[in-house]
Image: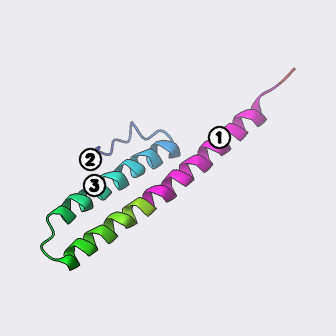
Amino acid sequence: MTALNNDELVSMQDILRMAIEREQEAYEFYIKAKEHARTPVEEQMFQELADEELVHKEELEKKLQDLDAQADIDRALSYDVY
């Protein structure tokens, strides 16, 4: 997992990218845990937790897309054409 370094977090996009990475790592963690499940109940629980991490990741990716789109709009609006 990437360590939190304030020098690297220069924008909201950076923060979201780090959060997306952590959601992916959590997903992989639960999938690996599922491989070591001793009962069907444990296996199901780890799969559900992994699925939740993917939902979180998708939500963060959508927020990142929205921020990127807004940044493009802001750049376009601030561009002076003379």
Left or right: 59 in relation to 39: right
| Residue lying furthest bottom | 41
Judge depth for marks 3 and 1 and give the one in front: 3
Pointer 2 residue? 1
Residue placed most toward the observer, 80 or 49:
49
Q: Which residues are magenta?
A: 56-80
Pointer 3 residue? 28
Question: Which three-letter amino acid code belongs to the residue tagged 2?
Answer: Met
Judge depth for marks 3 and 2 and give the one in front: 3
Residue at 47%, 49% (x, y): give it. 16
Residue at 31%, 58% (x, y): give it. 27
The secondary element bearing badge 3 is classed as helix
Q: Which mark is residue 71?
A: 1
| Residue lying furthest front | 40
Label 1 environment density (alpha carbons within 10 Å; few <14, some 14–19, many ≥20): few
Left or right: 2 in relation to 58: left
Q: Is residue 59 magenta?
A: yes
Dots 3, 1 in contact, CB < 8 A: no
Residue placed most toward the observer, 66 or 74:
66
Residue placed most toward the observer, 23 or 5:
23
Residue at 65%, 43% (x, y): give it. 69
Residue 58 in the image, given as x and y percentages of width and height: 48, 56
Which badge, 3 or 1, comes first in the chain's sequence?
Answer: 3
